[in-house]
Image (cartoon, helix red, strand yellow):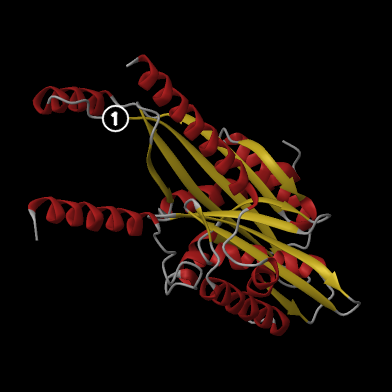
Amino acid sequence: MSTKAADFSIIVVFLSFSLVACQQKIPRDALALSPTSLKDRQLQTRIFETNNEMMLLTASAAVLQDSGYTIEESEVSCGVIVSSRDRDVTETGEVVGSIAMGVCLGAPVPYDTRQRVLASLVTKPIDDRRIAVRITFQHIVWNDLNQISKREQINDPEIYQEFFAKLSKSIFLNAHEI
Amino acid sequence: MRKALILISGLILALNICACAGKQKKILLTQESQVKLRSIQSRVFDTPDRNLMLRTVIATLQDLGFVIDDADETLGTVSATKFKSYSIRMTVSVRPRGDRQSIVRSNAQYNLQTVEDPEPYQQFFAALSKALFLEAQQIE
């Protein structure tokens, strides 16, 4: 094979590889129940001894507002409240580190600047006297180049415990019209 | 020389126009036929209870790691997003079929592609059926 022909075939092979890479397929288990789904559900759910779904939704909306969230969507008949919160997450240490790394590498190293947390709350009656409240959080983090540097579900148990502690308090406060 | 320059500019312009037209054509483009997609993405359930179906769909999506973005009982739709190392957006709609059944239709977008592979939908409907069965039996 001549050098030119060899070069050409290498280019074709690389091109087909990059085309294959573009056609990335959905992971096989993407829509299957994961082994941790029950554990996640328990972490994200609390059951309240009441049949008053409206009261639970009102108290939940109040907790989200207490925590600085903006209500984006709600559908009371399905027990859904969707809310979000945007915050600055720039940390001095990370900025200094990124500048130092940038100087060493001779190219800018991005650092995180802002994040959006999405909180989605759903109420669901279990029977005549109990209602389950489930909340899920996910966050998206952007860097100084306005690129998404992280997007994931938040699974820190402390956050969920804190939320439900606040919700219990909110139900009490609402009941006493405070 | 000048002629060549004009020719090249013309060619670039034509290519750009082609690319624009191509992108506009892609707005409604799918790999599979409309009928095949519907059969892959839809299932019939033996309940006319729209609210129960919607609430079960929401619970199933949450079990699958989705965060609910939007729900509308009037239209019968739920939209949700899942972030892992990838992102999946899903819309599930519920509509009545006669007096005794409901049709559940789901469509997913994986990163920037439409999901037209039957397997993920089979998994989704398996999870939904499991949740419906549990609901009927009131098992926790």
> Considering the numbered disc 1 on the image, is that residue within a helix, a strand or a loop?
loop
A31 horizontally vs A123: left or right: left
Q: Visible in this render: residue A129?
A: no
- Give the vertical position of A163 relative to B59 (above or below): above
Report the residue at 41% width, 67% height from top: A27
In the rendered structure, the residue with mark 1 lies on which chain? A
Badge 1 amino acid: Tyr
Residue extending furthest toward the right: B99
Residue B62, x across and y down, in percent: 57, 62
In the visual, does B29 lie left or right of A104?
right
Front residue (pair B82, A7) = A7
Q: Residues within 10 Å of mark 1 (few under 14, many from 20)?
A: many
Residue A70 shows in this picture: yes
Left or right, A13 with reference to A25: left
Residue for badge 1 = A111
Residue A52 is left or right of residue A105, and the answer is right
Measured from the top left, where is residue A72 in percent x and y? 66, 39
Q: Position of residue B77 (x, y in %)?
A: 73, 57
Q: Percent from the top left, x then y, of residue A6?
A: 13, 56
> What quarter of the picture does the N terminus of chain B occupy?
top left
